[in-house]
Image: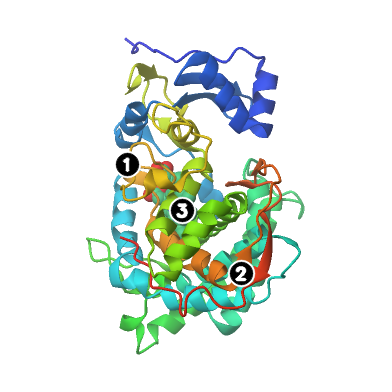
Amino acid sequence: MSPEIVMPPKAKAPVLVQTGLVALARVNSARHLRRHHGSAFSFRALTYGTFVVLSDPSEVRELVHNTAEFGRTDPNLGRILGPGSIFALSEEEHRNERKLLTPCFHGRRLHAHQDVITALTREAIARWPENEPFSVGEPLMELTFDIILRAVFGAEGRDFDELKVLLPRWMSFGQKLFALPIPNRPLFGLNPWERFQKGRDRYDVIIDRLIAAAQADPGLAERSDVLAIMVQSRYDDGSALSNSRIGDELLTLLEAGHETTASTLSWALERLVRHPEAVARLEQDLSAGRRDYLKATLAEVQRVRPVIDGLGRAAKVDGARVGRWSIPKDTIVVGSILLIHEDPEIYPEPHRFDPDRFLGAAVESTVWLPFGGGTRRCLGAAFAQLEMETILPLILDRFELIATSAPGEAWLSRGLTFGPKLGGRVTFRRRAEPLVDQAQQPTTD
Ligand code: HEM
């Protein structure tokens, strides 16, 4: 007998309208459906079928921990990032991969990246214009991209330059191909997947070269870049990562890590130019060598403008149980970060930007979810926090932010993340005196 199915209330609009709303107005549609149906609802999109959205924190917590009945949503990501990407792995393989990758972003190894982040940030912001409106989105994307090439790929010189030319174009082509089927016969040179594979071949040549150089490096054991750590790592059965697995994971870390961090920092500046009182307190704290208000500000930016709006999991079995619901197999269930962060019962006046909410208080992991939760929580969260807690003070150390009364920028979906529509438009004025003699060392614990 098939298990009983209990689905949350359905959105009523015609499927074509629902598909359009998901593609073009996801944030406002989610808010609207929450108001009409309560914390759980479902809707249909032609591209993905039926979705369930949950925004009760205890149900979302159950969703991300119930690995027996809910798993990863996108096996297709393996077509772009490679079959060994952690996004494409499930169950035991996923667990083993996390065990191997987690140490890359913790402790001594994490803090070893501080100098690279500082040097690249100083170099980048020295080129930013002053006294005129400037969109920080693209320059921040370039900065976080460069940081990953250096800190994660361990790339320098020719390898760095080649990856910098190849990866942005190849990966944006991959994003466009994402939804296309792979044809099972030749298309006389017109198969876009063949063109995509040529990009992968060029990428593999560079990765093989980087791995060979690392293996021949007498200082390998002291290196902290992720490629160097992967080359030396072993699974529990003693086996090493193959070159193509290393290539898949590096690509994954780049895709997961650079746009997310850059969009969060763009939102930070977008919010701060509209809240001069918060800037003043931030400046005061940084110049006194404190970091509490910085951490609170970043936590509040991530609450009020989470760059990833939901955590997707797919039901592995018919009747997969989460909270009050019993979900059919293959249905995607999304834990809504956005709706939890905007719940007035959890965060009074939720649309007000107020870093004081987090001052002197640890974030509560069931209701503060920018990095997700459960067994698939962001692997690079500590690295992202280190980057943000380094880059933002360096920007404020060099520039004053000119406050604006312009309305807040709208949310724009960039593919993977939501960023400010105008890229975070800011006017900087060069400080006569730096805010602090030397940017203080952040602590990320
Ligand atoms: C502010 C920046 C970032 C945000 C907001 C962010 C957010 C997220 C979210 C929401 C997830 C999904 C979690 C889930 O489904 O429960 C995720 C997964 C992941 N992130 Fe991040 N991320 C950021 C930066 C980074 C960085 C810098 C890296 C690495 C260099 C990284 C690597 C990963 C990886 C590998 C996963 C997949 C984990 C798994 O499936 O086990 N992220 N991230």
How would you rate the neighbour count of disc 2 (Cα within 10 Å): few for under 14, some for 14-19, many for 20 or more? many
Q: Residue 399 — which label?
A: 2
The Cα–Cα distance between marks 3 and 2, rounded to whole angstroms, is 18 Å
Relative to 177, residue 111 above or below: below
Which picture quadrant has residue 112? bottom left
Residue 187 coordinates in the image, percent (x, y): 74, 48
How many neighbours does mark 1 have within 10 angstroms: few (below 14), some (14-19), or many (20 or more)?
Answer: few
Asked whether mark 3 lies closer than 8 Å to ligand 1, one says no
Q: Earlier in the sequence, mark 1 or mark 2?
A: 1
Residue type marked 3 = Leu
Question: In this picture, is 29 found above or below 232?
Answer: above
Q: Residue at x 45, y 20 (%)?
A: 40
**Residue 217 x %, y %:** 39, 87
Whether residue 292 sits left or right of residue 80 in the image: it is left
Amino acid type shown at disc 2 = Phe
- Disc 3 + disc 1, Cβ < 8 Å: no
Task: Return the residue at label 3.
Answer: 298
Kindly identify which residue carries mark 1.
Answer: 364
Q: Which mark is residue 315?
A: none
Q: Position of residue 94 (x, y in %)?
A: 34, 49
Is disc 1 placed on a helix, strand or loop?
A: loop
Q: Amino acid at mark 1?
A: Glu
Q: Residue at x 59, y 56 (%)?
A: 269
Dot 3 lies on which element?
helix
